[in-house]
Image: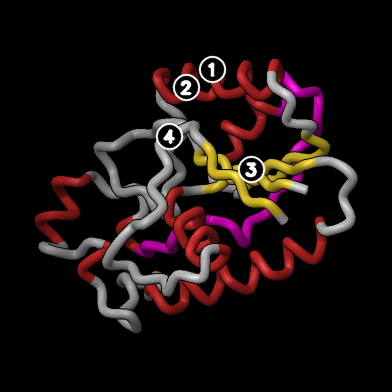
Amino acid sequence: MKCYLVRHGKDDDTVRGGWSSSPLTDEGVRQVEDLAERLSKGNFEIGAIYSSDLPRARQTADIVADLLNLPVTETPQFRETNNGVLAGMDNELAKKLFPGLFWSALDWEQPYPDGESPQAFYSRIAAAWAQFKEQIKRAENNVILVTHGGVINVICCIENGIKYSNKSNPFPVANAEMAEIEL
């Protein structure tokens, strides 16, 4: 059985992501429509679609689900990093109010203001992934999990036995692309 980890399509890159409520851009919608078309024409044998509940991921999942004629199950535990007060903040304002505050600049236990630390994010995703694998292990078909780049990086680190760090991204996945995990 396979789990396809799908990163949402392009969203508004003029604001900070994380727990922002930004939807897909027009380009992002086109990216996801192309992905959905590839999935519908390929031999992926998808039986279920799960999605982060953040708008950009859910919109991605809905586009794919419509073409594959499958329902979407929301999985809020697979949200991107909780970046607290920076979620959805204009990038220029964030640079002014929080100079130098970026994910890769945080110490392991240092949280975003009103948000998560890298340690808390990793722990949340690791626990959610273990529970999710247990939940889907008896599935007859492959599954899609629509989520975010940071989440995919954590899961791929876990599955490949690589120590996770917010200082690097050994498993980059472009918008509306996917990583395949054999379970």
- The structure residue drawn at horizontal position 40% and vertical position 37%, both measured from the top left corner, is 174
Q: Earlier in the sequence, mark 3 or mark 1?
A: 3
User: Closest to the observer: 108 or 85?
Assistant: 108
Query: What is the crowding at mark 2: few (fewer than 14 residues within 10 Å), some, or many (at least 20)?
Result: some
Percent position (x, y) of residue 35? 56, 23
- Circles 2 and 1, Cβ within 8 Å, touching? The answer is yes
Task: State yes or no: residue 80 in magenta.
Answer: yes
Give the residue type that dot 1 points to. Asp
SS at circle 2 = helix
Q: Earlier in the sequence, mark 3 or mark 2?
A: 3
Q: Which of marks 4 and 1 is nearer the N terminus?
A: 1
Give the residue type that dot 4 points to. Asn
Q: How far apart are marks 4 and 1 (CA)?
A: 11 Å
Circle 3 is placed at which residue position? 4
Circle 2 is placed at which residue position? 31
SS at circle 3 = strand
Percent position (x, y) of residue 8? 50, 37
- Circles 4 and 2, Cβ within 8 Å, touching? The answer is yes
Q: How far apart are marks 4 and 2 (CA)?
A: 8 Å
Percent position (x, y) of residue 166? 33, 67
SS at circle 1 = helix
- Circles 3 and 1, Cβ within 8 Å, touching? The answer is no
Task: State yes or no: residue 29 in magenta.
Answer: no
**Quadrant into which the C terminus falls:** bottom right
- The structure residue drawn at horizontal position 66% and vertical position 26%, both measured from the top left corner, is 64
Residue bounds of the magenta highlight: 65-84
User: Closest to the observer: 43 or 66?
Assistant: 43
Circle 4 is placed at which residue position? 175
SS at circle 4 = loop
Picture quadrant of residue 51: top right
Circle 1 is placed at which residue position? 34
